[in-house]
Image (spheres, rainbow, N blue to C red):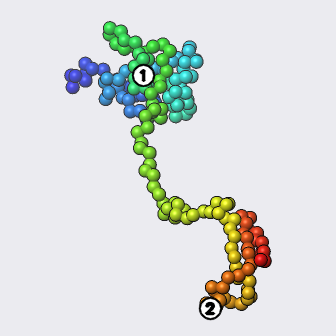
Amino acid sequence: MAEEAITPKRDEYCCVPQCNGNARIHKDLSFHRIPSLKIPELRKRWIIAIRRDEGPLFKIGNNTVVCSRHFKTEDFRWTLVRKCLKPDAVPSVFPWTSEVNTRKPPKERASVHKKVLAEIHVPSLQEFHTTVDLPTENLNEKPSLEKSNEVSDLHVECNANGTTKDFRR
């Protein structure tokens, strides 16, 4: 209990969404106030960077801070006593700006539909233009097994557009 009286409690919480930076738990973090209204351009850049707008649920006050997790090492200058944030530094390290894609891409899956389509042969226009010889005798009658071997003199051409031409030899 005497230790608590010596060490002052710091109630600083990072205001960045999805960040759990807490001065009581994370003693290695430094906390930095959002720039004052005297520097409106820098303040606006910080607010846009942290993706927070002032409204009924969020007000920027004197105790509104951003933890050191959201700054690059280049944003700090080191003194003998502590690290200080450079005057023009803007927070830029966030979960939503992660450059490394931690999720693996999905495996390539071949569906049954794709396999069937791959096996189907689609004729080209040159293959589609074919010539077939058909028997001319008894075209209106049903073919019988005996007459199926006879050679005919009717010549039919099928074109790519679906039209047919009959030629008699």
Packing grade of label 1 (10 A; few <14, some 14-19, many >=20) is: few
Q: Is 38 in front, or is 100?
A: 100
Q: Position of residue 36 (x, y in %)?
A: 52, 17
| Residue at disc 1, secondary structure | loop
Q: Position of residue 144 (x, y in %)?
A: 64, 91
Packing grade of label 2 (10 A; few <14, some 14-19, many >=20) is: few
Q: Is residue 28 above or below residue 18?
A: above
- Give the residue pinned by disc 2: 146
Decide if residue 139 is in sight here: yes
Residue occupying the point 69% across, 70% down: 131
Q: Position of residue 46 (x, y in %)?
A: 52, 23
Residue occupying the point 71% across, 81% down: 152
Res. 36 mark: none
Residue 142 occupies which quadrant of the picture?
Answer: bottom right
Q: Position of residue 84 (x, y in %)?
A: 40, 13
> Which three-letter amino acid code belongs to the residue tagged 2?
Glu
User: On the picture, is 87 further left or further right than 146?
Assistant: left
Residue occupying the point 57% across, 64% down: 121
Q: Is residue 81 above or below residue 54?
A: above
- Which quarter shows the N terminus? top left
- Give the residue pinned by disc 1: 72
Q: Please give the count of numbered marks on the rendered protein.
A: 2
Residues under labels 2 and 1: Cα distance? 91 Å
Q: Is 51 in front, or is 56?
A: 51
Residue contact between numbered discs 2 and 1, judged by CB atoms under 8 Å: no
Residue lying at the far top of the rendered structure: 80
- Which quarter shows the C terminus? bottom right
Between marks 2 and 1 in the image, the one whose residue lies nearer the viewer: 2
| Residue at disc 2, secondary structure | loop
